[in-house]
Image (spheres, grey):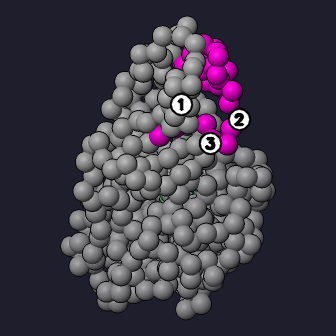
Amino acid sequence: MNQKVIFIGGGAASLTSAVLLKKEEPSFDVIIVEKDKKLGKKLSATGGGKCNVAPLKDNPYVYNPAAIEMVESLFDEIPLHDYLNILESIGLDTKAIKDYGFYPIHESAPQVVKNLYHQINKLGIKVIYDEFVDYSEKDGRVLVELKEQFLEADKVVIATGGLNEDMRHIFESHGVITTKTYPGLCPIKVKEDVSNLFGCRFEAVITLLYKKNIVRQTYGEVQFKKDGLSGIPIFNLSSLISREENFKSGDYQISVGLPDNFEINILGKTIEEALFMLFKEEYVNYLIEKHKFNRKELIDLSLEKKLLSIIHNEPFTVDSLYEMKDAQVTIGGVSLGEIDQNFALNNNKNIYVVGEALDVDGICGGYNLRFAITSGFKVVFELLNN
Ligand SMILES: Cc1cc2nc3c(=O)[nH]c(=O)nc-3n(C[C@H](O)[C@H](O)[C@H](O)COP(=O)(O)OP(=O)(O)OC[C@H]3O[C@@H](n4cnc5c(N)ncnc54)[C@H](O)[C@@H]3O)c2cc1C
């Protein structure tokens, strides 16, 4: 049957799913509505401009606890191998990069958006640049209200990304429950003055502590900002902190340092000599100033103990997280209890919600695009089979 399907939002989930749907069933009338002047803005910034579309291996346990079960059953249904094949069928051929994940062969996120845009034009998918403001039911179909016009559709797929207050209002006015939202995968502000460390980066063991108890330990590159810490392992820890309902500045600490099993012989050297063996100049100066060391002092047994503790575990006190605009994902969204196994709203089966708009977020490494795009594909299969 000739169906009209409107995708709300022109991001990762919509662009890929709209192309797949129209390609598989050209008789469908497919429309994308985007409030911005450009499609795929966020998608074109992913993966440091390279677009990490999936991890090397799925792991539902890296998503928020509320989502694990749903993500697991979605990935059982559309396993990684099938997902990558579907991407290839819509012109997004990928390759595995060791230790990182799957990326497009050309390793260019802007090129992914350009290629999708090209297909959208070629397939005759209409793009409307306007803002979605509401929906209602009309003779068994959906009446979609945009700022500038009304549209009618048989099915609507809402893929508007991280839930903002406007979208929350739309959902809640239709009785769809949403959860609180927080910034996820973002830099962390610390209380210490790290301004002189701006731009300094190195590989370290990074330990998150809550009231002095270890919450998580990870390894990777820590990057310093003027007022805090950044880098992939820090982003991943930020999502854990973000979920803490009663977060208070000072409760969390992040310790940074070299691995415990790293052989370090510093006895008999000066403090300066010892630290320069291990760290970059900015970090050496930071440690010397912060701990009020005498650079030229020779390291004896008692100083060795103190210095080794700093080398392995220099603590930074978490003050706050960066804001939503600096976050890679939004934690929270449409509550998963509001959708069925096909991502249709329980209270309106003509409306689907996919991608980051849902209360699903994963760690860095391709997990968020893997979920957002796969949830869209699941809806496409549902539409094709009905
Ligand atoms: C810098 C950065 C790097 C990232 N890198 C990666 C990575 O490498 N791998 C990974 O897996 N994830 C990455 N992510 C996360 C990933 O980009 C998102 O999880 C993903 O884009 C979510 O897809 P989506 O389609 O749900 O939403 P989006 O891609 O955010 O698309 C939503 C679209 O809806 C539009 N919209 C919103 N409201 C309305 C409205 N009312 N009317 C009309 N349109 C509307 C928005 O303008 C937007 O274009 C990164 C994110 C950022 C910010």
Q: Position of residue 378 (x, y in %)?
A: 57, 79
Q: Could you tell whether 75 is left or right of 250 in the image?
A: right
Kindly identify the amino acid type of the residue bearing the numbered disc 3. Answer: Asp
Q: Quadrant of residue 381?
A: bottom right
Start and end of the magenta stretch?
Answer: 255-284
| Sooner in the amino-acid sequence: mark 1 or mark 3 | 3
Q: Could you tell whether 324 is left or right of 4 in the image?
A: left
In which quadrant of the rendered image does the C terminus lie?
bottom right
262 inside magenta stretch:
yes
Residue at (71, 57) in percent of width and height:
102
- Disc tally is 3
Q: Is mark 1 within 8 Å of ligand 1?
A: no
Kindly identify the amino acid type of the residue bearing the numbered disc 1. Answer: Lys
In which quadrant of the rendered image does the N terminus lie?
bottom right
Instruction: Pick the residue in front: 37 or 70.
Output: 70
Q: Secondary structure at mark 2?
A: loop
Q: Nearer the viewer, mark 1 or mark 3?
A: 1
* Mark 1 burial class by Cα count in 10 Å: few <14, some 14-19, many 20+: few
Q: Nearer the viewer, mark 1 or mark 2?
A: 1
Q: Which residue is mark 3?
A: 260
Kindly identify the amino acid type of the residue bearing the numbered disc 2. Answer: Glu
Contact? badges 1 and 2 (CB < 8 Å): no
Mark sitting on residue 305: 1
Q: Which residue is mark 2?
A: 263
Residue at (63, 82) in percent of width and height:
76
Residue at (24, 77) in percent of width and height:
174
Q: Position of residue 321 (x, y in %)?
A: 35, 43
Contact? badges 2 and 3 (CB < 8 Å): no
